Image (cartoon, grey):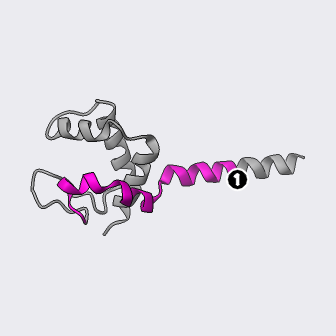
Amino acid sequence: MRKILLLSMAAWLMSQLALAEGNPAAGKAKAAICSSCHGANGRAVIAIYPNLAGQNREYLEVALRAYRDGQRGGGQAALMIMNATGLSDEDIADLASYYARME
């Protein structure tokens, strides 16, 4: 019984870690609105917008959550808050994973 419990807990933990890293394919599907400022390939064509391609996944998640939660200001924050408000934690993980894997 103990062995089954330990295996179940390990499987659950692994699934949670995979979910935390996001799904890049799902992120690609969710990135359409992002590409209008950050470029279709994650490289912005206008200097005031940052490149997202190859950016650190954890940083992107923290930044998007801060925009979504209204905790980040300055620059283009108003635009980012508007776009991030409807994102779930899963959406954010997926987008961050997608952009982090770009080169």
Instruction: Indicate the quadrant where residue 25 lies.
Output: bottom left
Q: Residue furthest left?
A: 47
Secondary structure of the magenta portion, mostly? helix
In the image, residue 90 sits, relative to residue 41, either above or below, namely: above
In the image, the segment drawn in magenta is 11-40
In the image, residue 38 sits, relative to residue 91, either above or below, namely: below
Q: Which residue is at a point 73% across and 47% down the rendered structure image?
A: 9
Question: Residue 24: within the magenta?
Answer: yes
Question: Residue 23: within the magenta?
Answer: yes
Residue with the mark numbered 1: 11
Q: Residue furthest bottom?
A: 103
Query: Residue 47, image x and y in percent?
Result: 9, 55
Query: Relative to 48, is 96 on the left or the right?
Result: right
Q: Nearer the viewer, residue 93 or 1?
A: 93
| Image quarter of the C terminus | bottom left
Secondary structure of residue under mark 1: helix
Q: Which amino acid does the dot numbered 1 rest on?
A: Ala
Query: Residue 8, image x and y in percent?
Result: 76, 49
In the image, residue 92 sits, relative to residue 36, either above or below, namely: above
Query: Residue 82, image x and y in percent?
Result: 24, 36
Query: Relative to 17, is 59 on the left or the right?
Result: left
Query: Relative to 48, is 38 on the left or the right?
Result: right
